[in-house]
Image (tube, rainbow, N blue to C red):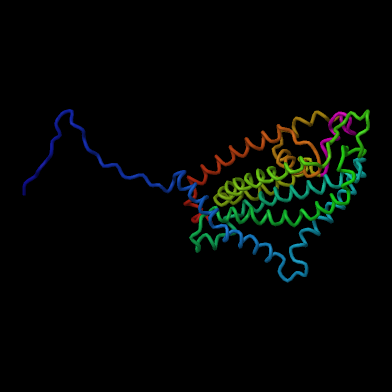
Amino acid sequence: MHATSTVHAAGSPVETSVPPMSDSRTFARAFADIKAGFHARELWGHLGWQDIKQRYRRSVIGPFWITISQGVIALGLGLLYSQLFGLHTSTFLPYISTGFIIWGFISGCLSEGMETFIANEGLIKQLPAPLSVYVLRTVWRQTLMLAHNLIVYVIVVAIFFGSLSHEYTLNSGICEPNFTGICHPGIGWSSLLAIPGFLLLAINAGWVTLLLGIISTRYRDIPQVISSLIQLLFYLTPIVWPIDQLAKGGARHNASWALPYINANPLFHFVQIVRAPLIGQYVSGFSWLIVGGITVVGWALALVAMRNYRSRVSYWV
């Protein structure tokens, strides 16, 4: 038996074998998953609609219970808080109704987004579909519920259109010559800004659902923490109380120190870019800037999580 050895000459390169890098944790795979999810729109579109139908199965009026419950809540609280805050009912009722509709979409994407992959455990283990399908299913379901709730908006605006079709205030309803508070321009062509506003809101709902869904699948205590914070965020965000009262000329202008903290609340800006155009209010450019910045940063974080943990979700559920 002869032993052989190979001696490399000095200065000659030494060949080493490098194992090929796996492409399962790359941004290309993450983008491919999202692209495949959009192409499977018939799947997530059908699943989202089935979720609504299953929730109201054997009901006489079906999903329109969403509209009725939203209308009753908006009417009851609108009448109550308009008296407590001393606000004009014809302008405050559209304000609170629209706020509830937008908040319902946001809170639904937060609460159900955390359970996106957990609730679809059976499908994830049996159906070879992209993970983004379940994210789109959740966002689509919330969009359908928002569409049903918009019926309340149409009815309220039709009733109080006379008060919203010109310059108005939430305090007295009419912009008087010596009024020093916030005077809103009224419903007009600027109301079409609600369309890009909702598109931005839905795009952000996508990364929120994706990111929170991955985190909550790994750490099951996160949904409990977020759920407890949603109620607190509701009261910290101007939904049932208008920011007009804190501005100059408002009934509570002595609490104007809270305005910087309200502007620091990102949920206020997400609500504002959709609600304000719908009821003829001005949308600050600062709100668009905040929402745009959060959209970029949020999707960057979601793509990082998708790249690193996409293949592990099926093991965590």
Q: What's the residue at 45%, 45% (across, down)?
A: 28
Q: What's the residue at 67%, 33% (across, down)?
A: 289
User: Relative to the observer, which residue lies in front, 44 or 265?
Assistant: 44
**Quadrant in which residue 123 is drawn:** bottom right
Q: How many marks?
A: 0
In the rendered image, the quadrant that contains the C terminus is bottom right
| Residue 90 sits above or below residue 247 on the image | below
In the picture, measured across the screen, residue 21 lies left or right of residue 65, that is left
Which segment is the magenta one? 240-253
Q: Residue furthest front?
A: 189
Q: Position of residue 270 (x, y in %)?
A: 70, 41
**Quadrant in which residue 187 is drawn:** top right
| Residue 14 is covered by the magenta coloring | no
Q: Residue furthest left?
A: 1
User: Relative to the observer, which residue lies in front, 195 or 147?
Assistant: 195
Q: Position of residue 198 (x, y in %)?
A: 69, 46
